[in-house]
Amino acid sequence: MSAPEDTMPAADPPRDDPTLAAEWALGLLEGEELLAARGKYATDPDFAWRKEWWDNWFAPWTDQMAGGAEPGDHVWQGIAARIGAPAAGEAPGAPAAEVVELKARLRRWQWAAGLTSVAAAAALALFLFSPLGSPVAPPTQVAAAEPMVATVPIGETGLRLDVTYIPASDRMLIAAIGLTPDGVHDHELWLVPDDGSAAKSLGVVAPGTVRSMAVPAEIVAELHAGSRLVLTREPLGGKPADADAGPVVAEGAFTTV
Amino acid sequence: MAARPRPTSDEAREALRDAMARLAAGDHAALEEIYRMTRVKLFGITLRILGDRKEAEDALQDVYVNLWQRADRYDPARASPISWLATFARNRAIDRLRTGKVRGGAVGIEEAAPLPDEAPLADALLVDAEQREQIHKCIATLDERTRTHIRAAFFDGHTYAELAERADVPLGTMKSWIRRGLQRLRACLEASEKP
């Protein structure tokens, strides 16, 4: 006998759904298991009910987490700015008027689309470096380029892809900030054409990054407000050429902002 | 101590409930009230999970912006506002932790800024006392080892893999300890819900 009895991998109790919900509520899950739990939450009302049941029972423990610390004043100012409320002490500097306008528009999109600040900053950078979005371009041209945004929420987790299309530069930003790679799967983003023809791949999503990609003309032709996006789970590297696409794990649609 | 009288727990909960209802109706000002009432408690949660002041503040900002965008998600029939908000804040912090950029873990006392007088309002916003007593009673029925790991998952945001590494046991062992514990915990909590 080399190991104490209680460290032997004894017969595992089967993991039923209520236990999975508890594991998720505690935050024990990561990678593929975490994705599976989120998927179940979005599609299975019993599972969603049970997750909230656990959340509710664990909630009293948060009373013991209070560290007595006060967040900085800039936190509320940031919130106020992001929701468009006036914030005390918010004094804009004096950069070029066009940049101020762009920033204001970005903030509105960010608010409307729930874009992460990283994604919004990347969108702003893309604007500034695109020919029409350049601060030296006449503002009318900037206004002519109406960007579109789509959020692809992953279950009800708050994690999501933020996809921004900037017509001025024919580029698309795909922000996958909260996602983590599980080392076994990749996720591939697809545009679903209106005519029912085969979905067009926008490529494999890079977890934890904001990626900017040039959009091929055949995809631009399909893009409009309301265009649908789906995210599928695939083997590493994306859908193999000779296989069907994997299961759809999330979807969203473009809106003009 | 603050010169002004502290609101009782009931008053604080009522004020929060009212502000949440106004927020759901689209009232901007309600968000600021909710922020003032809950920021210390929610910041305590994000700071504990993320272990980094800057990250915790970013997470806190996300929590309130999300709350504003999706105020309709809160269901008063399911949970008290503070219980729901606390859970929401913790879940957002865990999401952020899982992006892998953050160190996580406990926070040193030096991170804590002094509190202004009005802040202890957060003290009054405790999650339902009866519920607290019940989860305490049920968790106490588990063996100490299981109890410790379950609490470490909740308070420090550890994954199964991290808990197994810290305890120096195989991953499968940690999973079966915790799963058995969770199944017993569920039975105890469900029994307490029976009329």
Image: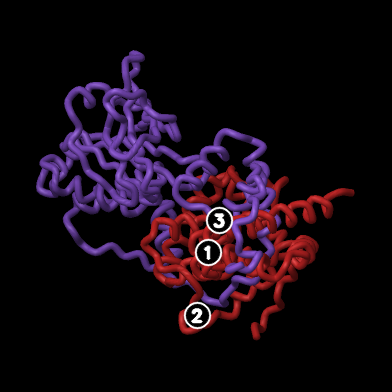
Chain colours: A purple, B red
Amino acid tagged 2 = Ala
| Residues behind callouts 1 and 2 on a single chain | yes
* Classed neighbour count for the residue bearing mark 3: other residues with Cα under 10 Å, few (<14), some (14–19), many (≥20): some
Could you tell me how far apart the alpha carbons at marks 2 and 3 are, in whole angstroms?
Answer: 37 Å
Identify residue for label 3: B172
Residue at mark 1: B164
**Residue at the image point whose x is 36% and y is 62% from the top:** B101
Against B124, residue A149 (above or below) is above
Residue at 20% x, 37% y: name it.
Answer: A171
Q: Is residue A157 visible?
A: yes
> In the rendering, at what x and y percent does residue B158 appear?
52, 63
SS type, badge 2? loop
Amino acid type shown at disc 3: Gly
Quarter that holds the N terminus of chain A: bottom right
Tell me the kind of residue under disc 1.
Ala
> Which residue is nearer to you in this view: A25 or A114?
A25
Residue behind mark 2: B112
Q: Output the chain of dot 2.
A: B
| Above or below: residue B78 compared with residue A238 | below
Left or right: A40 with respect to A161?
right
